[in-house]
Image (cartoon, rainbow, N blue to C red):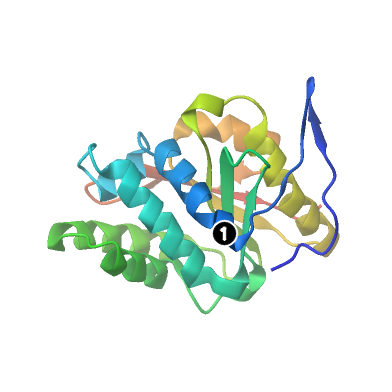
Amino acid sequence: MNLGEQQPDLDFGHRRVAAREARPDEHRSVCDVLGRAFADDPVAEFLFPDPATRAERYARFAAIAIAAFSSAGVVMTEPALRSGAIWQSPTHASLGPLRQLRLLASLVGLTRSGFGRAARLGELMSRHHPREPHWYLAVLGTDPSAQRSGLASAILQPVLDRCDRERLPAYLESSKAANIPFYNKHGFEVLEELRVPGGPSLWPMLRRTG
């Protein structure tokens, strides 16, 4: 899915970041970055308890998410491929979070107990997911070696700009309380705190139309 216009370079201090959509041949690299970015994430730890394989399995998880979202998705990155975001457009309503997680869990080879964890997570996400049209930020992550350098903000902004043009909300679930201020800075507000049965907390966040 094309965002419809050339994305400007975004200025972060003394650095300019040319955020853009990832080409299909770059998806593997973006997914590898996301695997490393989520190696210490509470939800990734919940789904993939083995730290030795977590990054690789999360990268596969991200790759299958991109394939599942197909033409209803947007994958954002930057030239060095050190940061990635996976979005679903407002046309994604037929593939809700519960169906997504069940599909992804089966394809990444989770054990029976792992599939149960994924199902509990997906059911909770599905119950609280907005019903009105919106852009959904499924995944946002930066390679640990490049975090806190403005890359995540840069690749986030083009889709948020599109939300503003289309007067559509954006939605996400933060899996770390420490990340909430980052999303607040971009206009997202916490709706509530959810607790996955037997697992971590999630903070659904909504960026309303202006």
User: Which residue corresponds to mark 1?
Assistant: 25
Q: Amino acid at mark 1?
A: Asp
Report which quarter residue 150 is drawn in.
top right
Q: Residues within 10 Å of mark 1 (few under 14, many from 20)?
A: few
Q: On the rendered structure, is 156 left or right of 27?
A: right
Residue drawn where x is 64% and y is 59% of the image: 23
Residue drawn where x is 39% and y is 73% of the image: 99
Q: Is residue 98 above or below residue 26?
A: below
Residue drawn where x is 21% and y is 47% of the image: 198
Most extreme residue toward the bottom is 94
Most extreme residue toward the top is 14
Q: Quadrant of the N terminus?
A: bottom right
Residue 114 seen by the camera: yes
- Nearest the viewer among 18 and 192 is 18
Residue 88, percent across and down? Answer: 59, 64
- Nearest the viewer among 207 and 109 is 109
Report which quarter residue 17 is drawn in.
top right
- Nearest the viewer among 69 and 160 is 69
